[in-house]
Amino acid sequence: MAPLGGAPRLVLLFSGKRKSGKDFVTGELQSRLGADLCAILRLSGPLKEQYAQVDGGCVMSGGLGEPTPELAAGVMCFGQDHGLDFQKLLDASDYKEAYRSDMIRWGEEKRRADPGFFCRKIVEGVSQPIWLVSDTRRRSDVQWFQEAFGAVTQTVRVVASEQSRRQRGWVFTPGVDDAESECGLDDFGNFDWVVENHGDQQRLEEQVENLLEFVRSRL
């Protein structure tokens, strides 16, 4: 499903472990390219928004009071109201971490019912020519974008040592760090790009500049 603004010139699918620096790298790219040319798309965005919107124990769509037919088919109802803050769920805060396990379980229910549900949501109405999908987690995500946008789709893996990730606040959490949302692309194979983010700022800068040069060649 192409966005209303037309097909993108380049789609970069970023993946990596928690605290590897995916958001930092995509943020740097957008900052240098400009938000008018480059859009950061989060697969977790519609998941968090719909998980956060609750009425009577059921996740609702977009806060409109009634679930859409598409959402209703796969929605998971909870026994208590969540009443969560959508914006806080989007960042890397402790607030998000407190609800991560529940969001993962709810998201898996949605994907089992419709593997492309969240992918279709995030491309709606995007007009910029460069798309950075900052949280690609599953083979089904990669497959959807490759089938929808073909050769303009490339994969980017951000890697960091466990020591570096711990220094950024990572702590192994059972049910999160061993779930498909963290491990689904561990054996993906050959990524088009690998960005090493072990704490060497000069090395990271070189890699970001190389990626920027490639992106600009597609404009």
Image (cartoon, rainbow, N blue to C red):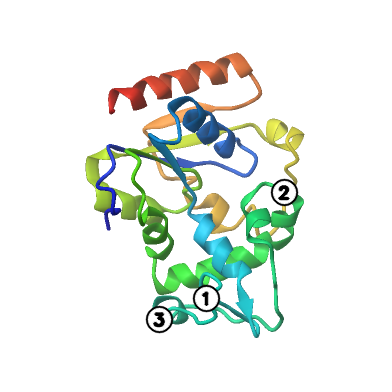
Q: Which residue is mark 3?
A: 69
Return the x and y of residue 46 as percentages of the image width and height: 50, 61
> Which residue is found at the position 63% from the left and 60% from the top?
86
Q: Secondary structure at mark 1?
A: loop
Q: Is residue 50 above or below residue 78?
A: above
Q: Secondary structure at mark 3?
A: helix
Of the residues shown, which amino acid type is indicated by label 2? Answer: Ser
> Do the numbered discs 2 and 1 sit on residues whose CB atoms are within 8 Å?
no
Instruction: Mark 1: give few (<14), some (14-19) or many (20+) Cα within 10 Å.
Output: few
Foreground residue, 151 or 61? 61
Specify the quadrant that holds the N terminus. bottom left
Of the residues shown, which amino acid type is indicated by label 1? Answer: Leu
Tell me the distance, in whole angstroms, between the alpha carbons under discs 3 and 1.
13 Å
Q: Quadrant of residue 189?
A: top left
Q: Secondary structure at mark 2?
A: loop
In the rendering, which numbered label is found on residue 93? 2
Return the x and y of residue 32 as percentages of the image width and height: 48, 25
The answer to whether residue 7 is left or right of residue 21 is: left
Q: Which residue is mark 1?
A: 64
Specify the quadrant that holds the C terminus. top left
Return the x and y of residue 214 as percentages of the image width and height: 34, 23
Q: Nearer the viewer, mark 3 or mark 1?
A: 1
Of the residues shown, which amino acid type is indicated by label 3? Answer: Pro
Tell me the distance, in whole angstroms, between the alpha carbons under discs 3 and 2.
32 Å
